[in-house]
Image: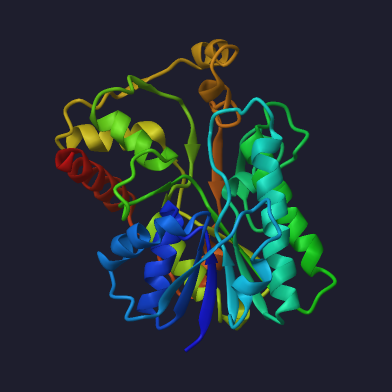
């Protein structure tokens, strides 16, 4: 049985990747910052699949060298999912950039030392947004300009981490595959609603969030993201390529609120915040400032190559939205 080191297993995407790996016959060694989380993560994963003794853990920190060599020992692949994600603007951008870049390089260096042939890296569509002016034709050749106006620490962190990864493997025998979701939604396995994706839906269905920004981008179902991570491990055609894993077309955030409202979530507001108001508030509010790269823009990613290489079709937008809302509603009801 082939074994995969999966970093960030306790996260939203990481847990779904673990489930998909186990379902497809891989053994999983998941990294967490503290081994005290292990039992909870296992319980969450058991909701979807019985690990049957093929799940183990190791403690790793993106900013520390300790443990990386031991973590990859005996593994056939590395799936590097761990990376900090917040949309708010931190006081120091290096709070996001340093762990993203250094953690990626630690994973790659350990993999190379262990003779691992292929690493699958979670990147993002935010590493493909050009000069942040809105781009109808984002594809596998697109990169975000880290010197663009309104660039955020998160966009920089994902772009610089991925560039560091490609630079590292350019002179190595190792193969790299990068997976690029848009905003990721879909059911939670952990019942944790504090992350960006779950928090948005919680605030929507409880009526806390009164207005959405005007923006349009391809959106991703976490189950698709996990599926492509796993398929990318051993697909020969995927070697050294970047793949957008998202909906066929771009969607607005008001399409999410409209669908929720029409599906019986009565507290959901369908109002849109005027662009000028968001720009004004961005001067005082770090969350609003984090929205500026998307405000009034349309980003549309081309998933043709992803569909072809992996014989894949994305989860329908309506199913993604309603499954997410149902998952959040269940957690809220359970208290």
Residue placed furthest toward the front: 36
Determine whether, in the image, residue 27 is placed left or right of residue 145.
Answer: left
Question: Could you tell me which residue is drawn at 21 percent across and 32 percent down?
Answer: 261
- The quarter of the picture where the C terminus appears is top left
Quadrant of the image occupied by residue 289: top right
Determine whether, in the image, residue 294 is placed left or right of residue 14.
Answer: right
Question: Could you tell me which residue is drawn at 59 percent across and 59 percent down?
Answer: 60
Q: Is residue 12 visible?
A: yes
Front in this rendered view, residue 99 or 68: 68
Front in this rendered view, residue 195 or 29: 29
Above-or-below relation of 63 to 70: above
Above-or-below relation of 310 to 188: below
Front in this rendered view, residue 192 or 89: 192
In percent of width and height, residue 25 lies at 40, 83
Above-or-below relation of 286 to 25: above
Question: Could you tell me which residue is drawn at 75 percent across and 68 percent down?
Answer: 109
In percent of width and height, residue 33 lies at 53, 54
Q: Is residue 128 visible?
A: no
Determine whether, in the image, residue 21 is placed left or right of residue 229.
Answer: left
Front in this rendered view, residue 237 or 10: 10
Residue placed furthest toward the bottom: 1
Question: Could you tell me which residue is drawn at 75 percent across and 76 percent down?
Answer: 113
Above-or-below relation of 318 to 254: below
Quadrant of the image occupied by residue 233: bottom right
């Amino acid at each position: 049985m082939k074994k995969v080191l999966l970093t960030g297993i306790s996260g939203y995407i990481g847990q779904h990747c673990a489930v998909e790996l186990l379902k497809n016959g891989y053994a999983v060694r998941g990294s967490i910052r503290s081994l005290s989380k292990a039992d909870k993560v296992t319980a969450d994963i058991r909701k979807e699949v019985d690990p049957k003794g093929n799940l183990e853990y190791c403690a790793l920190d993106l900013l520390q060298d300790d443990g990386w060599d031991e973590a990859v020992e005996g593994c056939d692949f590395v799936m590097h999912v761990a990376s900090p994600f917040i949309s708010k603007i931190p006081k120091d951008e290096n709070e996001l950039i340093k762990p993203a870049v250094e953690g990626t390089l630690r994973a790659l260096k350990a993999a190379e030392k262990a003779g691992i042939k292929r690493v699958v890296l979670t990147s993002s569509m935010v590493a493909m947004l050009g000069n942040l002016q809105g781009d109808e034709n984002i594809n596998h050749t697109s990169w975000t300009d880290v010197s663009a106006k309104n660039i955020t620490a998160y966009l920089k962190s994902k772009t610089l981490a991925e560039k560091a990864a490609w630079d590292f493997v350019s002179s190595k025998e190792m193969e790299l595959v990068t997976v690029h979701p848009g905003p990721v939604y879909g059911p939670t396995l952990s019942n944790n609603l504090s992350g960006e994706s779950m928090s948005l839906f919680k605030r929507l269905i409880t009526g806390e969030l009164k207005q959405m920004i005007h923006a349009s981008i391809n959106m991703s179902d976490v189950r698709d993201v996990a599926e492509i991570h796993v398929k990318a491990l051993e697909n020969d055609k995927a070697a050294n390529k970047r793949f957008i894993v998202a909906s066929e077309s771009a969607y607005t955030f008001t399409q999410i609120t409209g669908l929720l409202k029409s599906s019986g979530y009565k507290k959901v507001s369908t109002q849109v915040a005027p662009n000028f108001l968001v720009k004004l508030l961005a001067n005082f509010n770090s969350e609003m400032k984090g929205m500026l790269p998307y405000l009034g823009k349309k980003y549309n990613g081309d998933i043709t190559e992803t569909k072809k290489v992996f014989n894949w079709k994305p989860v329908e937008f309506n199913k993604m939205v309603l499954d997410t809302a149902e998952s959040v509603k269940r957690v809220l009801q359970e208290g």
